[in-house]
Amino acid sequence: MDGNGKIWFTDDGIPALVRAVYRFNPHTGSVRIVDQRLKEPNGIAFSPDFKTLYVADSGAETVPDHAPAVGQVIYNPYNMTDPHVVWAFDVIRDGTALGNARPFHLIHKWLPDGLRVADNGYVLVGVSDGIDISSSDGDLILKIQTSFTAVGNTWAGPEAKDIWITGVGGVQKVSINLPGGKVKWMAEEYTGENGTVRSLT
């Protein structure tokens, strides 16, 4: 969700939708494509100031149409010559479009999945053998290793300093001094078909 209460999401190939990054406006019901350049857009998260959007391209997970297929994770083959990168985009045109696309973090194994951004701007991404934590400049500064296939992660606990990692074959809790998960968009009210709705703060 961006700073104005709009909901951004990805679709990686469900038959009803094209592979793209979408923005949903709950005020009007409008859904629009804001970017369609990634092969398989997956995880998505905003920087704390909402000026940068991070999107994982998991294109390496698609069935390889060329050699070499490197391996298989969660019953899906992957090919490391296909996309396995977290991209960064500038949010432009009053939050209706994306620009200045640039590779942000190359995953060394498998592909990027669940994305989160800490309150200090560090980016967390599930990468199969753990969670990569990168600076806001894209430099890898820490890896949290797991004994299972790490996919998603989220904050919990007092002051949101605990990270729960979920995946195939396990769940892991990590206590780390890296708080995140604050919802910073402004509170507002609007009237929909079913009456007045107050947004979360």
Image: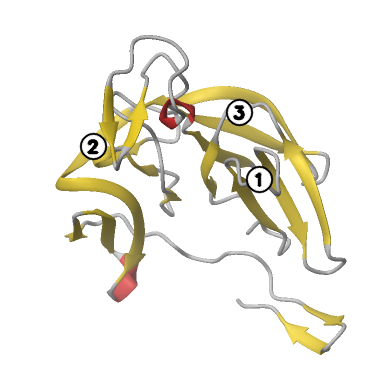
Q: Residues within 10 Å of mark 3 (few under 14, many from 20)?
A: some
Type of the residue with mark 1: Pro
Residue 136 lies, with reference to residue 144, above or below; the image says: above
**Residue 111, image x, y percentages:** 37, 32
Residue 59 lies, with reference to residue 155, above or below; the image says: above
Q: Residue at x 63, y 25 (%)?
A: 101
Residue 38 marker: 3
Q: Quadrant of the C terminus?
A: bottom right
Q: Nearer the viewer, residue 189 or 80?
A: 80
* Nearer to us: label 2 or label 1: 1
Q: Which of disc 1 and disc 3 is earlier in sequence?
A: 1
Q: Quadrant of the N terminus?
A: bottom right
Q: Residues within 10 Å of mark 2 (few under 14, many from 20)?
A: few
| Residue matched to label 2 | 142
| Residue matched to label 1 | 15
Q: Which of disc 2 and disc 3 is earlier in sequence?
A: 3
Type of the residue with mark 2: Leu
